Structures are given as C-alpha cells and as structure tokens.
Image (cartoon, grey):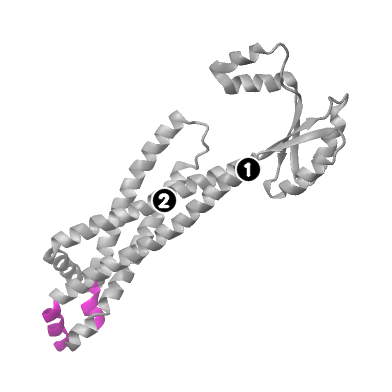
C-alpha cells in the first residue's frame, strides 16, 4: 500500500503508451459485457414469466350434462392432491369473459340466437402434478371433457430453457473473449516495457512488485468496461420497462430495481474478476521475457 502511488503512475504509463489499442479494448469489453447483461435481463424476465404462469396454471372441466348440484363435483375435485382452487363459471359469465376478450369484435356473439357457451369448472392446480390431477378429474362421474394449457406452458418452459442455455453460452464466450483480450494487452505491455522489467529485476525487485501495475491495468480496463455496460443496460431497462408497462401492461415483469441490482452486481464483479485473471495469464510471459 505504501507504493500504491507508484503502481498507479506505472499503470497510467502502460495505458497511455498504447492508448488507442487500450481504448478499443475498453469499448470492446464494455460492449461484450453489455451483451451479457442483455441476455441475463431477458433470461430473468422470461424466468419470471414462466414462474407466474405456473402459479396461474389452470384447467377447465366441462360437464357431460348440467348437474343439479355441481357442489358435489366441486368438492370431489377439491379433494384431489394437486388442486388448490375450484370455481364454477356459469354460461353467462363465460359469455361475459369472451366479450371482454373480443373487445370491439364482441358483436359477433350477438349473431347467435342462444348463448353458445356452456358452464364449466375453472380449476387451479400445481403444474408439477398435472398428470395425476388430469387423470383423477377425468374419472369423476359427470365430467365429460377436460381442457388444459399444458402445451402452451411447455412451449414457454422450452423457450426459457433455450434462453438459459444461451445465457450460459454467452457467459462462457464473454469470459473467454475478455480473458484473451486482457491477456494480449498485458503481454503487449510487458513486451514494450521489457527493458524496464529487466532493470527492476537487476535492482532486486520481486516479480509481484513488477507485475502489480500490469494487473492494475487489466483490472481498470475491464472494470471500466463493466461500468460502461452497467450504464448502458440501466438506460435500456429503464426505457424498456416504461414502454412495456404502457403498451403491454399484462406482461408480468420482475421488480425493476431487483433486476438491475442483480445485473449490475454480476457485471461489476465479473468484470473485476476477469480483469485480474486475464492479467495473471498475461503475466505468465514475464519469466520468458526475463530469460530473453
């Protein structure tokens, strides 16, 4: 810590010596990390959507003929393991719901002389128990047909898994690319300062003393890139939430502050770790330069 001023000055000299290349490395690292933050944001939103849809998973059960007392069937369904709520939807309520869905096109329903909708049971279930629940409901006397939205949920879960895999691939690509960029920059700095490094070794300076400014350079470049990526992703998420909230308010979005905190924390901690690791890889060439 006594030599921190010297280390900072040396790091500044290394950065200024090849300023154009270092600026492009800073910008490239920032954009790569921004891509990582974008994928993580989409991943988090899609995961939240799947979780909420699973919590709202429901199936509809239709009667073979309208029972005089539907409470008996409702109580039988409520007793099934995996069912947490059952509600009766009458024909008029079913029509009213469809009118709300159709909006301005609801006049189509007036073309029917009679109400085309039938009463049914709306059943909320735990998604992980959908198979035994469906089988049990189909076996209940008085139930003619059961409709579920499992295909839609499975498609959404498939998209979420694809985004999850994409997220892991992007994390791996960003990590490898950043390590290669920083390692190359550190090796380049070592090569341009090889005479100074030899002099310091002749004066008895240990490898840690010689290498720390290079580690500091790698840390500053990637951490600066992490700050740039955090600023860009913050602006993007704030604008995205404002537009989605106004245009599509029915989309269940995770809390913005929590999402931003997680992404910024990932970008800053990840960029710092990658900068240090990349610098250490680059420093492996010091012994070769010294031997030369």
Q: Position of residue 202 (x, y in %)?
A: 14, 88
Horizontal placement of 78 versus 211: left or right?
Answer: right
- Depth check: 138 or 70 in front? 138
- Depth check: 281 or 145 in front? 145
Q: Position of residue 199 (x, y in %)?
A: 12, 84
List the residue tagged with mark 2.
39
Magenta highlight on residue 210? yes
The total number of labels drawn is 2
Per the image, label 1 sits on a secondary structure element best described as helix
- Quadrant into which the C terminus falls: bottom left
List the residue tagged with mark 1.
151
Q: Position of residue 103 (x, y in %)?
A: 56, 19
Q: What label sits on residue 106 in the rendered view?
A: none
Q: Quadrant of residue 124?
A: top right
Horizontal placement of 140 versus 50: left or right?
Answer: right
Label 2: how many Cα within 10 Å (few below 14, some 14–19, many 20+):
many
- Quadrant into which the N terminus falls: bottom left
Q: Earlier in the sequence, mark 2 or mark 1?
A: 2
Q: Residue at 52% across / 49% down in the picture?
A: 160
Magenta span of residues: 193-214
Label 1: how many Cα within 10 Å (few below 14, some 14–19, many 20+):
few
Residue 241 seen from this side: yes
Q: Position of residue 208 (x, y in %)?
A: 26, 80
Magenta highlight on residue 207? yes
Q: CA distance from mark 2 to mark 1?
A: 25 Å
Per the image, label 2 sits on a secondary structure element best described as helix
Residue 206 seen from this side: no
């Amino acid at each position: 810590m006594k030599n921190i001023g010297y280390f900072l000055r040396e790091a500044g000299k290394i950065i200024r010596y090849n300023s154009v290349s270092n600026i492009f490395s800073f910008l490239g690292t920032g954009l790569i990390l921004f891509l990582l933050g974008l994928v993580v944001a989409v991943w988090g939103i899609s995961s939240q959507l799947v979780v909420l849809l699973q919590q709202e998973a429901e199936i509809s059960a239709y009667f073979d003929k309208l029972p005089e007392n539907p409470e008996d069937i409702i109580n039988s369904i409520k007793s099934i393991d995996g069912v947490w709520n059952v509600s009766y939807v009458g024909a008029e309520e079913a029509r009213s719901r469809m009118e709300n869905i159709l909006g301005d096109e609801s006049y189509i329903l007036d073309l029917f002389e009679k109400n085309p909708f039938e009463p049914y049971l709306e059943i909320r279930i735990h998604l992980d128990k959908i198979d035994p629940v469906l089988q049990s409901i189909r076996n209940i006397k008085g139930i003619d047909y059961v409709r579920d939205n499992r295909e839609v949920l499975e498609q959404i879960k498939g998209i979420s898994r694809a985004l999850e895999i994409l997220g892991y691939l992007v994390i791996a690509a960003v990590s490898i690319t950043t390590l290669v960029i920083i390692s190359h920059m550190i090796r380049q700095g070592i090569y341009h300062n090889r005479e100074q490094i030899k002099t310091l070794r002749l004066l008895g300076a240990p490898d840690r003393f010689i290498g720390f400014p290079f580690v500091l350079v790698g840390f500053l470049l990637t951490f600066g890139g992490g700050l740039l990526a955090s600023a860009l992703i913050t602006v993007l998420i704030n604008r995205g939430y404002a537009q989605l909230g106004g245009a599509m308010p029915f989309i269940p979005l995770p809390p913005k502050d929590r999402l931003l905190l997680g992404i910024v924390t990932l970008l800053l901690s990840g960029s710092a770790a990658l900068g240090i690791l990349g610098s250490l890889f680059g420093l492996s060439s010091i012994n070769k330069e010294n031997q030369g």
